[in-house]
C-alpha cells in the first residue's frame, strides 16, 4: 500500500516530455501526456516508452505496469502521421521507416512483457494507441471507449499488429473493422479480442482498479472489472456506493458487431475486396449499405492490400504480423495515397481525398501481391 502523498510524475531522462512516469507502490505508472494531440505518439514518445518499459521489465520494485492517457478525450489517437507525411514529402522517407521500426518494437515489447501490463483504454484509442494497449495482458475499456484502426482513411493500412486480433475475431467482424476504419465501442473491443472487460469510466472507477492492483498486481481483468464496478473480486460487495450513469452504461453496453453478424459474415467473406464491396452495396440491410459507403470512400489501394494482409495475419504470431507491417510500411510511404490521405483528413481537413485508383476494381491482383514482395 502507498501513502496519500501525491505521485511524482516525471519524463524519462533525455526522452522528451510526451510520456511521464511514476512509481506507485508496486506499480510502474505510464501516462501519455500530450492531451492537446489526444496523446498522439511522436518519435520522442515512442523512444521514451521503449526505454522505460525495458528498464521496468528488469526492475524488481515494479510488479506491474499500468498505462493511461492524460486529458479527457482518450488514451491515444495514434501515431503522429502528420509528422510522417512531412518527412515523406521532404524526401526523408527513412525517417518514417525508422519511426515505424521503433514503434513496432514497443508493441512487440508490450505483447511479450514479463510482468502484468494493464491498459486503461478510456475514450479514443486508435492506431498506434491500439498497439501499446491491446497487446497488453489486461485491457480495460469503458462505455466511453471509441476504438478504431482507421488507417484506410488516410491511405495506409492497419499496422501495429492490429491485424493479429482482427484476423481472429468472430466471423468477419474484424474484416469489417479493418476495411471500414470505423470506430467501435468497448463491448465491441472485447468481442474483437482487443480488450478484456468493460468497466465504468471516471476517476473513482480507475482509482478502485489502482487500489486493487496495489494490493495484488496480478489481479486479472475479471477481478478488476468487479472492483471497478464496486463489487469485490470474490463476488461479495464493497462498501455501498451510489451507482453513477457511467456504471449503469458500462453494465448494459452490448456489442453492436455481435448483433450485426447476420450481414457482416455474409458480405465480408472471401479474398476479393471488390466482391465484398459489391455484396455490401447490394445487401438490403441499411447498415450494410452504410458500410459500403465507408469502404467505397477509402483508399482503394489501402483496402485491397489490407484485406490481403488481414487474411495472411490469420496464421501469424504477433511478431510475424509486426514483421509483415515493417515490409508493408515502405510500400505505403512511397504510395501517393498516404500523403494525400493524411492531407485530406488531418492537414487541410477537406475530407475529399483524390486517390490514385478510382475504385477497387482498378487495383490489380499484381499490385496487391507486389506490396508483399511476391
Image: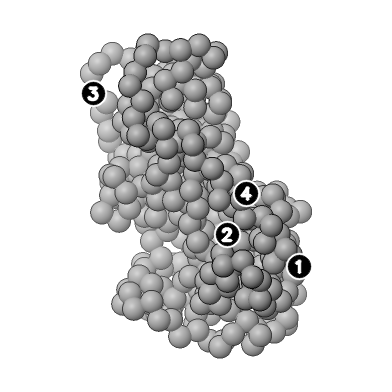
Q: In the image, residue 238 lies at what x, y percent?
A: 42, 13
Disc 1: CA contacts within 10 A as few (<14), some (14-19) or many (>=20): few
Residue of label 2: 177
Q: How is the image coloured?
A: one colour
Give the Cα distance between marks 1 and 3: 54 Å
Mark 4 or 1 closer to N-term?
4
Q: Residue 6, labelled with which disc? A: 3
Res 16 visible: no
Res 230 visible: yes
What residue appears at the point 67 percent right and 61 percent down from the top-left corner?
Answer: 263
Give the Cα distance between marks 2 and 4: 12 Å
Q: Looking at the rendering, in which quadrant would you find the N terminus? A: top left
Q: Residue 258, labelled with which disc? A: 4
Residue of label 1: 270
159 w.r.t. 358: above or below: above
Which circle, 3 or 4, is nearer the viewer?
4
What residue appears at the point 64 percent right and 70 percent down from the top-left corner?
Answer: 284
68 w.r.t. 176: above or below: above
Amino acid at each position: 500500500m502507498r501513502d496519500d502523498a501525491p505521485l511524482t510524475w516525471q519524463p524519462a531522462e533525455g526522452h522528451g516530455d510526451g510520456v511521464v512516469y511514476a512509481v506507485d507502490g508496486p506499480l510502474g505508472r505510464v501516462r501519455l501526456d500530450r492531451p492537446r494531440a489526444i496523446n498522439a505518439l511522436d518519435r520522442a514518445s515512442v523512444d521514451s516508452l521503449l526505454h522505460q518499459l525495458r528498464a521496468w521489465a528488469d526492475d524488481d520494485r515494479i510488479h506491474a505496469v499500468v498505462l493511461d492517457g492524460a486529458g479527457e478525450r482518450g488514451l491515444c489517437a495514434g501515431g503522429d502521421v502528420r509528422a510522417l507525411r512531412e518527412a515523406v514529402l521532404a524526401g526523408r522517407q527513412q525517417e518514417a521507416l525508422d519511426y515505424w521500426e521503433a514503434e513496432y518494437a514497443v508493441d512487440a515489447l508490450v505483447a511479450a512483457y514479463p510482468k502484468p501490463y494493464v491498459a486503461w483504454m478510456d475514450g479514443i484509442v486508435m492506431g498506434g494507441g491500439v498497439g501499446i494497449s491491446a497487446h497488453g495482458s489486461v485491457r480495460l475499456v469503458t462505455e466511453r471507449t471509441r476504438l478504431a484502426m482507421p488507417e484506410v482513411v488516410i491511405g495506409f493500412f492497419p499496422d501495429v499488429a492490429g491485424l493479429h486480433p482482427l484476423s481472429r475475431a468472430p466471423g468477419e467482424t474484424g474484416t469489417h473493422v479493418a476495411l471500414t476504419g470505423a470506430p467501435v465501442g468497448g463491448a465491441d473491443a472485447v468481442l474483437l479480442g482487443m480488450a478484456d472487460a468493460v468497466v465504468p469510466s471516471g476517476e473513482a472507477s480507475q482509482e478502485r482498479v489502482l487500489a486493487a492492483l496495489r494490493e495484488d498486481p496480478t489481479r486479472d481483468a475479471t477481478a478488476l472489472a468487479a472492483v471497478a464496478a464496486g463489487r469485490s473480486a470474490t463476488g461479495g460487495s464493497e462498501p455501498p456506493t451510489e451507482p453513477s450513469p457511467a456504471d449503469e452504461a458500462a453494465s448494459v453496453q452490448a456489442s453492436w458487431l455481435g448483433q450485426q453478424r447476420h450481414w457482416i459474415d455474409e458480405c465480408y467473406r472471401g479474398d476479393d475486396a471488390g466482391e465484398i464491396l459489391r455484396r455490401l452495396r447490394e445487401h438490403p440491410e441499411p447498415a450494410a449499405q452504410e458500410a459500403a459507403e465507408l469502404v467505397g470512400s477509402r483508399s482503394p489501394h489501402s483496402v485491397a492490400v489490407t484485406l490481403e494482409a488481414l487474411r495472411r495475419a490469420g496464421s501469424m504470431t504477433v511478431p510475424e504480423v509486426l514483421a509483415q507491417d515493417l515490409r508493408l510500411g515502405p510500400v505505403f510511404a512511397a504510395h501517393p495515397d498516404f500523403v494525400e490521405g493524411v492531407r485530406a483528413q488531418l492537414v487541410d481537413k477537406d475530407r475529399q481525398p483524390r486517390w490514385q485508383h478510382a475504385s477497387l476494381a482498378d487495383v490489380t491482383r499484381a499490385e496487391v501481391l507486389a506490396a508483399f514482395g511476391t
